């Protein structure tokens, strides 16, 4: 069993994702090659859009989870590479459709695909990548991995529809919100991790532990993202701050602040998020309210709780370099906001 | 071997889809129950939209192909029912996304889902139905059927992207256009038919024949649709005429008329379809040109050629009631326009 420290604020060094990146770099090279080749098509627009997204440099955390959770069991085949590429395609397809649904202008500091090629192409290229993802999974030939990933695919879409209902509704409860992020974020992290021991032919216990690790990390990751969108617990007004606010998204910081606020505060949130009548100074006022009611710091605390559950799940998995790196990944995710 | 008559214009009776409907009615009852149950979700919007589409009464030709192509081999399990429901979900997801991409207002004589619930919900519920389709396929457990249907899913999306490029471009060639309809229509008909003998454990020869039948029928079906959009070969100006024209879609009748037209005719097509500057009387003029250059009647002739290839493929499949009904289905598809 791995001995993994519980996450605390006084880490000896700045947590880094580098140990995980280094450990799976061989497999990730193959994943990246496969992604580029499977994003190809004779229909020119497809590789053009796919490469725009793929080269725009996400961290590729999800496929790294798949690789690490297979390699930690000494898995020697190449099925984990194909599954990891499928997971990244599922994620990329979701991003393309999300940007259309959210009417987003930017994605990872670049113009969103829909601004460059239009909503139509974004919807259809997303569909293509999803189809390719399933084809790749079928190539691997594990019905269990197919079950896990196809279930995640349906659950993610269900979560997005749920979020659509919660959007612009400040009556959203904490339970509603957690249901949304379990579906739209944590489910894919969970599936990405679980298919590692599946392809490596491991026991139910190992599969369950990997799934739990991924799920809890997914919650932590999303809550940190939500806090970062308001500048994090320090609430610095960085350049990428306020997207959720402008899009009327109800995230946990807002849910907490609404619940604790006065009637006047609620009127403010209602005007900005339901009515989308946002004026100069409103974002600053929102952040003021989030700080006043400790909504950002508490969101970060919840993220740490989920992070600790992820670390606890690692105790069941084999100790060693992979387990350590997966532990570092948890600390890294949370350190983005601390 | 089945003895199937070649399609001719002097059929003794009006061809009907009824023999196929009657033959697979038991299985279709189960398919419809499965569709309703799998379109369910705790997220209310999902069954609401799914049921709107499902109850709006398409002919369900694709799932009937799957049932007939399994039952013709005496298949006794229920895998064909699940695969048939998957096929219908794939098709429904495509319709939801198509309406968003085409900015359509109507679908099967009802308001399109996107007009009732918005583009966002249409994109996401389409994704959900696609995820459910894959989950159902995984339940059946045939990797070969999964390969065929996931490939169709990627090909359909590729065809839609290709069509996006061809849209509003009167330089589209006949070869370009056939490539589009092979991908966006014929591929799913082919897959729907092929998974029948696959689930029934049949030989490569039978699988290939079923696939060919579906593919050729799919071409015929789409070409008939294209002709019907301009009123069919008789060019009656019915109520559902002109959607493709108004959306700037380049279909085979237009490709043929553009190729045969004068410079002035091409200016007309360019103004209407590329520029989308459609004035009163333009649709009538378009139909006039299509008639003048025999573009509608020739489209129907091509559909008959494909229909005859579908009938020829039936010769390889077992003769009997199923083969006869599949032959009637070809004649029915073509009779819609004759």
Image: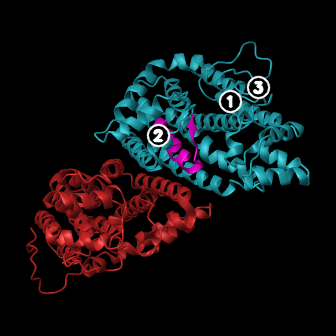
Chain colours: A cyan, B red
| Residue B214 seen from this side | no
Prevailing secondary structure class for the magenta stretch in the rendered image: helix
Q: Spatial distance from mark 2 to mark 1, Cα to Cα?
A: 21 Å
Looking at the image, the residue that sits furthest to the top is A12
Circle 1 residue: A239
Q: Position of residue A328 (x, y in %)?
A: 65, 21
Q: Which mark is residue A214?
A: none
Q: Spatial distance from mark 2 to mark 3, Cα to Cα?
A: 34 Å
Labels 2 and 1: the sequence-earlier one: 2
| The C terminus of chain B, quarter of image | bottom left
Q: In this image, B233 relative to B36: left or right?
A: left
Looking at the image, the residue that sits furthest to the right is A262
Counting labels gives: 3
| The N terminus of chain B, quarter of image | bottom left
Few, some or many residues within 10 Å of mark 1 (<14, 14–19, 20+): few
For marks 3 and 1, give the one nearer the viewer.
Answer: 1
Q: Which mark is residue A338?
A: 3
Q: Residue at x 90, y 52 (%)?
A: A264
Q: Do tag 2 and tag 1 residues touch (Cβ < 8 Å)?
A: no
> Is A165 above or below relative to A238?
below
Q: Badge 1 sits on which subunit?
A: A
For marks 2 and 3, give the one nearer the viewer.
Answer: 2
Q: For mark 2, give the secondary structure.
A: helix
Rendered image quadrant of residue B284: bottom left
Q: For mark 3, give the secondary structure.
A: loop
Q: Residue at x 86, y 37 (%)?
A: A294
Q: Which mark is residue A116?
A: 2
Q: Residue at x 51, y 71 (%)?
A: B52
Q: Do tag 2 and tag 3 residues touch (Cβ < 8 Å)?
A: no
Q: Nearer the viewer, residue A338 or B25?
A: A338
């Amino acid at each position: 069993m791995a001995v993994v420290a519980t996450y605390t604020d006084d880490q000896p060094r700045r947590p880094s994702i580098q140990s995980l990146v280094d450990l799976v770099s061989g497999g990730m090279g193959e994943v990246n090659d496969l992604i580029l080749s499977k994003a190809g098509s004779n229909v020119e627009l497809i590789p053009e859009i796919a490469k725009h997204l793929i080269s725009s440099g996400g961290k590729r955390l999800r496929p790294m989870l798949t690789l690490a959770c297979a390699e930690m069991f000494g898995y020697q085949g190449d099925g984990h590479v194909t599954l990891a590429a499928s997971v990244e395609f599922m994620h990329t397809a979701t991003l393309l459709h999300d940007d259309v649904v959210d009417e987003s202008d930017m994605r990872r500091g670049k113009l969103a695909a829909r601004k460059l090629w239009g909503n139509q192409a974004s919807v259809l290229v997303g569909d293509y990548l999803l189809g390719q993802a399933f084809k790749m999974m079928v190539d691997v030939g594990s019905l269990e991995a197919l079950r896990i990933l196809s279930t995640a695919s349906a659950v993610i879409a269900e979560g997005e529809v749920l979020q659509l209902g919660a959007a612009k509704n400040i009556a959203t409860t904490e339970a509603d919100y957690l249901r949304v992020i379990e579906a739209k974020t944590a489910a894919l992290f969970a599936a990405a991790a679980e298919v590692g021991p599946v392809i490596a032919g491991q026991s139910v216990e190992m599969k369950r532990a990997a799934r739990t690790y991924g799920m809890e990390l997914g919650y932590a990751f999303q809550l940190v993202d939500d806090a970062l969108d308001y500048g994090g617990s320090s609430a610095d007004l960085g350049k990428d701050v306020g997207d959720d606010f402008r899009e009327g998204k109800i995230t946990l910081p807002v849910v907490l602040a609404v619940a604790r606020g006065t009637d006047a505060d609620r009127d403010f949130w209602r005007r900005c998020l339901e009515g989308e009548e946002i004026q100069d100074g409103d974002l600053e006022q929102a952040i003021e309210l989030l700080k006043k009611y400790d909504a950002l710091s508490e969101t970060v605390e919840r993220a740490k709780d989920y992070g600790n559950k992820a670390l606890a799940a690692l105790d069941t998995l084999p100790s060693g370099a992979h387990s350590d790196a997966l532990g570092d990944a948890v600390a890294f995710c949370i350190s983005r906001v601390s």
